[in-house]
Image: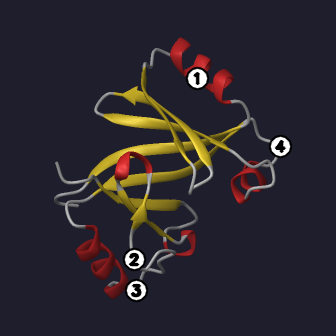
Amino acid sequence: MSGRTLDHVALVVADLKEAEQLYTVLGFDVRYRERVADQGVDIVGMSAGDETIELLKPLDPASPLERFRGDHRTRLHHVAYRVADIEVELARLSDAGLRLIDQHPRRGAHGNLIAFIHPSSTGGTLVEVCQPPAD
């Protein structure tokens, strides 16, 4: 995919501090900590080379993310790739017949524009498309 690169892999965790400690022991460093209130999550980004492993802890114990995690301590939530123009990418994906959760981008962590592709179009994996804010 020309012009696209892996941005992050996101894991929903039961205990953010415990997960951060585990990934620190595994050799990763904390890149950032952020609360995204309108997404309902606290995030710890762990360095993984040029990419990031995002540890997501829902703020609400009754949230869809917590239901998704179920009784797992950690569960893969989504894989994200970065694009230069998210509007163009969403149009391209829609034209290709993929089912989009987000028809239009919304704000995510770090001020990124984000949108999700429905898992029914990706073999069962939730995929996020993100565009970093302009500098």
Which residue is denoted by mark 2 in the rendering? Answer: 104
Give the crowd class for mark 4: few <14, some 14-19, many >=20 residues within 10 Å: few
Percent of width and height locating residue 85: 21, 66
Crowding at mark 1 (Cα within 10 Å: few <14, some 14-19, many 20+): many
Mark 1–mark 4 Cα distance, whole angstroms, equals 19 Å
Secondary structure under the numbered disc 3 in the rendered image: loop
Q: Are marks 1 and 4 in contact (CB under 8 Å)?
A: no
- In the picture, residue 88 is in which quadrant? bottom left
Question: Left or right: where does residue 101 sit relative to residue 89?
Answer: right
* Residue to which mark 1 is pinned: 20
Whichever of labels 4 and 2 marks the residue nearer the N terminus, that label is: 4
**Marks 1 and 2, Cα distance to the nearest angstrom?**
32 Å
Identify which amino acid the numbered label 1 is placed on: Glu
What residue is shown at x 38% (from left), y 29% (from top)? 48
Location of the N terminus by quadrant is bottom left
- The mark nearer the N terminus, 2 or 3, is 3
**CA neighbours of label 3 inside 10 A, class few (<14), some (14 to 19), many (20+):** few
Residue that label 4 marks: 71
> Looking at the image, is mark 1 or mark 4 earlier in the sequence?
1
Which amino acid does the dot numbered 2 rest on? Answer: His
Answer with mark 4 or mark 3, whichever residue precedes in sequence: 4
Residue hosting label 3:
97
